[in-house]
Amino acid sequence: MTYRQHEEALNNPVFSIISDAARELSLDSYVIGGFVRDYLLQRGTPKDIDIVAIGSGIELAKLVAKKLPGSSEVSIFKNFGTAMIKFKDTEIEFVGARKESYHRDSRKPVVENGSLEDDQKRRDFTINALAISLNPEDYGQLLDPFDGIGDLKRQLIRTPLDPSITYSDDPLRMMRAIRFATQLNFIIHPESLQAILDNKERIKIISNERIVDELHKILASSKPSIGFALLHETGLLSYIMPELVALQGIEEIEGQRHKDNFWHTLEVVDNISKNTDNVWLRWAALLHDIGKAPTKKFDKKIGWTFHAHEFVGSKMVYKLFKRLRLPLNEKMKFVQKMVLMSSRPIVLSEDFVTDSAVRRLIFDAGEHVEDLMTLCEADITTKNPKKQKRYRNNFKIVRQKIEEVEERDHIRNFQPPISGEEIMKTFNLRPSKEIGMIKEAIKEAILEGDIPNEYNAAYTLMLQKGKEMGLKAE
Ligand code: CTP
């Protein structure tokens, strides 16, 4: 990994404006936290800037807003003693240095003013406690009392204080440690890891929204399994998603074993992350097998079965989303659909791939058929090279067939070629179940391949079905 020197970090002209404003108010100010960390790590140009003032952060924000043409009004969060202004696409947050618990999301009022170092040691990790001076006498100097730079180089997540203090100040930090370890591919210091194990139960006091924020960030990383393995190892996962933990383990009866579906799931999530940035598709990969724990059975003749686990799993998605306060909108429906259909392409590819089976797959998956294929391909985790090759090849055939069939039959965004209104007009009908029956017969005939997806053929079939049902065309 390459590191940037901090000298160039203050190129953005807002820093000199903040510096001038602080001087006018006779207070010291520093840029601190994620901005400094990400700048040094060359993680793009950080969007959010955190400023700590030795004095009132709110007063500083007000003066900066005055001096910065084009900046937004100041939003003040009095309880937390913080203020924020937006400038172009940057959010600049101001806080006064504190002695006691730093954290702005804490419900406790934080009042006692402190020095820069007081503030730094109350932050979560040494790499997040790095500060750069905005004061004229040492403008641009890096202030690093806890060797955050050393930890960046060692790729280490470490707390400035005894980790049990840092984590009890804000138990969400246990998840943040794991999230940063995943995003940055860093190691969590053993003492920190132990402290997380010891304090895992305290995660209960953290709101689901904040937990989910971290889960999203873990899932959006390039190798999410790092985070989920750590969540599991520390015991946090049992509090957050026991459904996943229930997948762990291999049982053996009469010499028959099933795979460990927890570790398999993590492999699937890593696989899919190579092929998609869609975080909801990654959620689907994470949850695609959750129905396997409650449906697991052993049958003397056929061995282990997970009958209807896709259906059970898709129901569990709703409960899990509701509990974690994930959105219960079309995103959830998408995840449910992926889970429900997750075995369809496999079943299909094991047999001779018929056009009608492909049409049904496209019809049921609709606009998400590509995503479904991406999920199924990620689901191949066999270590047997022969099987691996066979599965990949089968899916290639399915994909080709999907393209061919779709080009010909246009099933993906299926619109019935004959509308209900036209059926009503033809047979002089009022709204009734006959209309639905005729529509269904036309759809079935198209999916089966009995007629092409075209108006004329559908019209003829409509007349024929109507006749069979004793209806008279006008
Ligand atoms: N911080 C903390 N404890 C927390 C949250 C934040 O000590 N529970 C401090 C850290 O110094 C952190 C800074 O506040 O760097 C800003 O927090 P935030 O914006 O949440 O995170 P970033 O570090 O900027 O990282 P990211 O944007 O990736 O979340």
Image: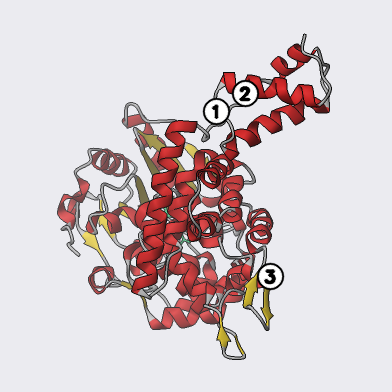
Q: Position of residue 377 (x, y in %)?
A: 42, 58
Using the rendered view, name the quadrant where residue 462 is placed: top right
Marks 1 & 2, CB-CB < 8 Å contact:
yes
Q: How many marks?
A: 3
| Residue 135 shown left or right of residue 463 in the figure | left
Q: Residue at x 41, y 30 (%)?
A: 72
**From the viewer's perspective, is 12 left or right of 219?**
left
Q: Amino acid at mark 2?
A: Ala
Mark 1 Cα shell of 10 Å, populated few (<14), some (14-19), many (≥20): many
Q: Identify the mark at residue 453; answer none if there is no mark.
A: 1
Mark closest to the chain's N terminus, 1 or 3: 3
Ligand 1 positioned in quadrant = bottom left
Tell me what residue is drawn at x 58 percent, y 69 percent: 244
Identify the disc placed on residue 295. Answer: 3
Check if mark 1's residue and mark 3's residue have beta carbons within 8 Å.
Answer: no
Sequence-wise, the earlier of marks 2 and 3 is: 3
- The residue at the point 38 percent across, 46 percent down is 400
* Disc ID at residue 458: 2
Instruction: Give the left or right position of residue 470, taking residue 159 as reference.
Output: right
The x and y percentages for residue 349 are 48, 57
Amino acid, disc 1: Asn
Of badges 2 and 3, the one in the foreground is 2
The amino acid at mark 3 is: Thr
